[in-house]
Image (cartoon, rainbow, N blue to C red):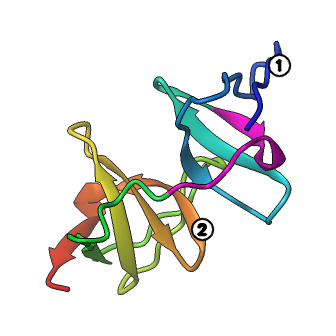
Amino acid sequence: LHSFSTRHPKQLSFHRGDVIAVVRRPKPGGWWVGELNGVLGKFPSSFCKVIDLLDPAEPEKLLARALFSFAARDQTEISISRGDVINVTHQHKSGWWRGELNGFYGRFPGNFCRLIDC
């Protein structure tokens, strides 16, 4: 909806029309964490409109079961416990995946999980 410019190192600048991958949305209407052009940072959610980039004609759901527990080390990661089923939103070749668990979005180690059938 609006552009946002900042010099704060933990905040994310963006221009109107940019598409930000939301990593974590702690509460509606607050500051969210997102990724744009490989840069992670906080941004005001009130400056943005949520869009769904998935094609509703072909919903693809990727699920993974946690084989090991992992404690998040910062706000860009999610904690997982053995047995959790995570909605995987992105698998990066580095081995760090992004996903959602219990309403929290973030990165987690893909090698701690096994993909499961939906």
> What span is colored magenta in the figure?
41-51
In the figure, is residue 24 to the left or right of 46? left
Q: Name the image quarter holding the N terminus.
A: top right
Which residue does the numbered mark 1 point to in the structure image? 8
* Amino acid residing under circle 1: His
Label 1–label 2 contact, CB within 8 A:
no
**What quarter of the picture does the C terminus occupy?**
bottom left
Q: Residue at x 56, y 50 (%)?
A: 23
Between 103 and 55, the residue placed more toward the observer is 55
Q: Is residue 37 above or below residue 49?
A: above
Q: Quadrant of residue 82?
A: bottom left
* Image coords of residue 54 (percent x, y): 34, 60
Q: Secondary structure at mark 1?
A: loop
Q: Position of residue 77 (x, y in %)?
A: 54, 53
Q: Is residue 115 magenta?
A: no
Q: How many marks?
A: 2
Query: Residue at the spot x=60%, y=74% of the render?
Result: 103
Q: Position of residue 53 (x, y in %)?
A: 40, 53
| Residue 10 position by quadrant | top right
Q: Residue furthest left?
A: 117
Q: Which residue is mark 2?
A: 104
Mark 2 surroundings within 10 Å by alpha-carbon count, few (fewer than 14), some (14 through 19), many (20 or more) = some
Return the x and y of residue 16 as percentages of the image width and height.
67, 27
Direction from residue 39 to residue 43 in the image, left or right: right
First along the sequence among labels 1 and 2? 1
Quote the CA–CA distance across marks 1 and 2: 24 Å
Residue under the point 57% across and 49% down: 22
Residue ID at (18%, 72%)? 115
Q: Amino acid at mark 2?
A: Phe
Q: Residues within 10 Å of mark 1 (few under 14, many from 20)?
A: few
Compare residues 54 and 26 and report the one nearer the observer.
Answer: 54
Magenta segment includes 50: yes
